[in-house]
Amino acid sequence: MTAMNDFDFFVLARVLHVFGVVMWIGGVAFVTTVLIPSLRRVSNAENRLDLFEQLEGRFSLQAKITTLITGASGYYMLEVMNAWDRYLLPQFWWMHLMTLVWMIFTLVLFVLEPLVLHRWFHQQAQKDSERAFVWLHRMHQVLLSLSLIAVLGAVAGANGYQF
């Protein structure tokens, strides 16, 4: 049995990075395109909120774990490649967007949601469920759109395509 070398760790980091992105952004896509639209069709506002909190709460743990995996593996790859200067080059715009999307989700998942957003959304949904879910859906649509642009740009950019 051979010891893992730096190249093996880099490949492992890339595998974990892609795995994390697929699980995280795939989950966001499901929440945005399937879960929230389905919940908006639930006529009983209280049931809608309860169901959302049950289902989205389960995804929250997955999102937290996968954003940590994605962030740690992305940092590792940047460090190993000594690629920090890419943030100074406009052709690597997708790295800026990837990092921005990661920062937004990390801030929301680990700071804003537990400290502010959960309670705020619950109150808004009790006051006007339809309006609260429209707002929630729009925010998810914006974040999903940014995420998908980052994914498409990253795949193209990582394979040598320059915009």
Image (cartoon, rainbow, N blue to C red):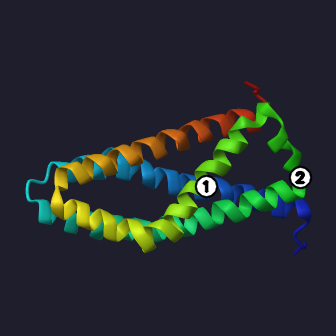
152 relative to 107, above or below: above
Point out which mark residue 74 bears.
none
Tell me the CA gap for discs 2 and 1.
20 Å
Q: Does label 2 or label 1 sit earlier along the sequence?
A: 2
Three-letter amino acid code at the position of disc 1: Trp
Name the residue located 61 percent from the left edge and 40 percent from the top edge: 150
Amino acid identity at mark 2 = Met
Disc 2 + disc 1, Cβ < 8 Å? no
Mark 2: give few (<14), some (14-19) or many (20+) Cα within 10 Å: few
Q: Is residue 48 visible?
A: no
In the visual, does 49 lie left or right of 100?
left
Question: The N terminus is located in which quarter?
Answer: bottom right
At horizontal 48% and vertical 39% (from top left) the residue drawn is 145
Where is residue 26? Give x, y as percent: 47, 51
Image quadrant of residue 89? top right
Q: Position of residue 156 (x, y in %)?
A: 69, 32
Give the answer, above or below, for where 163 lies relative to 16: above
Q: Which mark is residue 102?
A: 1
Q: Secondary structure at mark 2?
A: helix
Residue 12 in the figure: left or right of residue 70: right
Question: Nearer the observer, disc 2 or disc 1?
Answer: 1
| Left or right, 16 with reference to 109 | right
Give whichever of 29, 13 is nearer the camera: 29
10 Å neighbourhood of mark 1: few (<14), some, or many (≥20)?
some
Kind of element beneath mark 1: helix
Q: Quadrant of the C terminus?
A: top right
Res. 87 in view: yes
In the depicted view, which residue is nearer to us: 138 or 74? 138
Question: In percent of the image, x 39 and y 65: which residue is there?
Answer: 117
Q: Which residue is mark 2?
A: 81
Task: From the top left corner, tell me how far across and down residue 64 is, in percent.
Answer: 53, 68
Task: Tell me what residue is drawn at x 44 percent, y 52 percent.
Answer: 28
